[in-house]
Amino acid sequence: MTTFRLDERLARDSQSILELPLCDVRLSRDSRWPWLILVPRRADVSEIFELSEDDQLQLLREQTMVSVALKGATDAAKINVAAIGNIVRQLHVHVVARFEGDPNWPGPIWGFGAPEPYTDEAFSAMTQTILDALT
Amino acid sequence: MTTFRLDERLARDSQSILELPLCDVRLSRDSRWPWLILVPRRADVSEIFELSEDDQLQLLREQTMVSVALKGATDAAKINVAAIGNIVRQLHVHVVARFEGDPNWPGPIWGFGAPEPYTDEAFSAMTQTILDALT
C-alpha cells in the first residue's frame, strides 16, 4: 500500500486551510476567483470512481459542505465543481465561486490566463472568511 | 412545486440515450469528445447541494456508473467530471472522456472552439458503445 503524498504542483499552487476527515481543503493562491481544492488523502487515485464507496460518500459530504460554505461566504452567482486532473493526476476536486464579470465568465477557469497571487493579508482574510462559513 | 422541464439548450446540444432513476443520460452532439451529460429530473435546481440528500447520493451513484462505463467503452486517459452551469443554470453534470492529443488537451473542453457534429451513423455507433458498457 502506497502512502499518500500531496502532488508537488498542488502543494505549490494552493495552501491547506483545513483538514476534513477525508480531504485536505486547500485555497488556491490565485486571487482571481475564490477557489478551493479538495484533495482526498488517498494514494494512487485519479478518478472519483476509484475511491471506495465509503470514500465516495465522504467526498460528496465534504464537497457539499465546502460548496455551501463557499456560496455563503462569497454570495457567488454559481459554484463550479469539477474533477478534471488531465495535468495533475492525483485526484482533486475544484470548488470555485464564480461571479458575472469575473475573469473568463461564463467560461471555465482552468487553463485561462495567468494566476494573480494574493497579498499575504488578502490570503489570510479569504481563508478566515471561508473558515468562518465552514464552522 | 414546479414540473421539471429540460433546458432548451441542453435539448438542442445533446440527445437522451438512457433514463436512469434520477438522471436523463444524454450524449452531446459534439463529436470531438465522447461527452455525456447527466441531467437530474428535478425542477429549479442549479447546484448539487440544492438536491435533497437522497438525490445527491443517487446522482453520485449514477455519475459513478456512467464514468466507469465511459472509461470502459473508450479506454480514455482521463474522465473529466464537472458541474459548471454558468450558462445553462439547470443542474447538469458533464462526464467526458479525454485523450492525450484530443482537441484542447490537457485544457478543458468547455467554451473551446466550435462543435463538430457526428454523422447519424457515428452518433448511433457511439450511443451503442456506451449503452453496451452501461448494461
Image (cartoon, coloured by chain):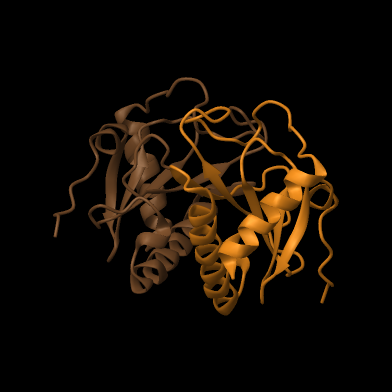
Chain colours: A brown, B orange
Q: Quadrant of residue B97?
A: top right
Question: Residue B127: horizontal and vertical position, in percent?
Answer: 70, 55
Quadrant of the drawing holding the C terminus of chain B: bottom right
In the image, residue B25 sits, relative to residue A105, either above or below, namely: below
Quadrant of the drawing holding the N terminus of chain B: bottom right
Q: Nearer the viewer, residue B55 or A18?
A: B55
Question: Which residue is pictured at 42% across the width and 24% down the height?
Answer: A115
The answer to whether B30 appears left or right of A109 in the picture is right
The answer to whether B29 appears left or right of B54 in the picture is right
Q: Nearer the viewer, residue B115 or A122?
A: B115
Total tally of numbered discs in the picture: 0
Question: Which residue is pictured at 28% across the width and 40% down the height?
Answer: A15
Question: Residue A16: horizontal and vertical position, in percent?
Answer: 27, 46
In the image, residue A40 sits, relative to residue A114, either above or below, namely: below
Question: Which residue is pictured at 50% across the width and 44% down the height?
Answer: A96
Q: Quadrant of residue B30?
A: top right
Q: Is residue B92 visible?
A: no
The answer to whether B47 appears left or right of B5 in the picture is left
Residue extending furthest toward the top: A114
Question: Which residue is pictured at 34% across the width and 26% down the height?
Answer: A119
